[in-house]
Image (cartoon, rainbow, N blue to C red):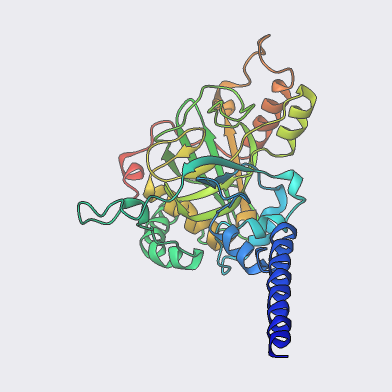
Amino acid sequence: MRLNKRFVLLSIGVVGMISSAAVTLALTHSGSPTDAPTPEMATEQARHHKVIPESAPAEVVYPLRFSYVPDDIHAYFASPSEELSWSVETLEGAAHPDTWSTEIQPKTGPRSKRAGRSTGKKSRSRVRKRRYTLKQRLKEISPKAKQRIAKKFEAANAQWPPAEIGLVGIKDSKRLELYARPKGGGEWMYIDRYPVLAASGISGPKLRRGDKQVPEGVYRITFLNPNSRYHVSLRVNYPNRFDRKMAKKDGRRDLGGDIMIHGKNSSAGCLAIGDDAAEELFVMAANIGMSKIKLIIAPTDFRKKGLPEYMAKQPKWLPDLYSEVSVAMAEFKAPPENPSLLTLLGF
């Protein structure tokens, strides 16, 4: 009798072990719900620009830049009080995902635990830079930037804050002109000019990713990045509707993007204007709203030199683009070529 009880208990134990193993195997192959990332986890990964492959390879891929932002994205950030940061989640709400993409570059995965310990110093890869919200960045840079802006508007006898801001970029003279229009309308008033410290490429529009060209056309500002590698930056809405329309005619697909006006003095396809100038534009954009800023980028000053002659190797649509740019530039009265010393010093 005792033997039978022992046999029964042993049988139950064996059956239980087999059932447990079967359930574990089934969950492993079918995918347990607890293994799938939760919405909170996905949001956190998107917020920090991390894309984690399913198979957990030796390398982790980090998306570095967004290559296209829709034309109407400024509507999402019309209020300067909003806290902006790079967010895949925000961009997905602005347009269909097919209309924008993420440029990624492989970066080696986590270093071994021993790395950085031999010298007793912390590994540089583990040091994280502070990430600002828009409010935090503005609180830091606004006081001094507003003082500089106020002097320039006072010298130009212009109203601050203005109703609109105009920026005219001239590639061959390497300058970015600042204009303002007062509330109630009226003519554009010249305020200042910023030297472009670095801008790659030659005369001509941007056609594809990697050509290192500064785009040419009439654009808007669509995003303020308080955490730019180049101090602070303002994102240009390249490619705009005209750029995409001409690319479709030409059969061009990858137009590139991520065109910025930013600080520092180095650039590849962007306009680097130095930290002080970038701060001023950044603060003005946050105060009056990005939708109130008009940006024109031209190969040369059409107001003084007229339109260039068409050359056979150029895109067939280029004369149409330059005509559009020329009409847009005509609203802004060209400043004198040799401003006074007081103007250059900001008085």
- The residue lying furthest to the bottom in this view is 1
Quadrant location of residue 42? bottom right
x, y percent for residue 83: 55, 67
> Is 309 situated above or below 115?
above
Answer with the quarter of the image where residue 94 lies: bottom right
Q: Residue furthest left?
A: 119
Residue 188 % position (x, y): 58, 47
Front-most of residues 192 and 24 = 24
The residue at 70%/71% (across/down) is 20
Q: Nearer the viewer, residue 79 or 347?
A: 79
Q: Is residue 158 visible?
A: no
Quadrant of the drawing holding the N terminus:
bottom right
Q: Position of residue 28 (x, y in %)?
A: 69, 60
Q: Is residue 4 visible?
A: yes
Which residue is at a point 38% across and 56% down the rendered structure image? 151
Q: Nearer the viewer, residue 92 or 73?
A: 92
Which of 298 and 56 lies nearest the eye of the viewer?
A: 56
**Residue 6, image quadrant:** bottom right
With 107 as the anchor, is 5 left or right in this view? Answer: right
* On screen, residue 243 above or below 67: above
* Residue at 34% from the left image edge and 42% from the top image edge: 344
Residue 292: horizontal and vertical position, in percent?
A: 63, 54
| Residue that extends furthest to the right in the rendered view of this protein | 249
* 244 vs 306: above or below: below
- Identified at 71% across, 69% down, the residue is 18
Q: How many marks?
A: 0
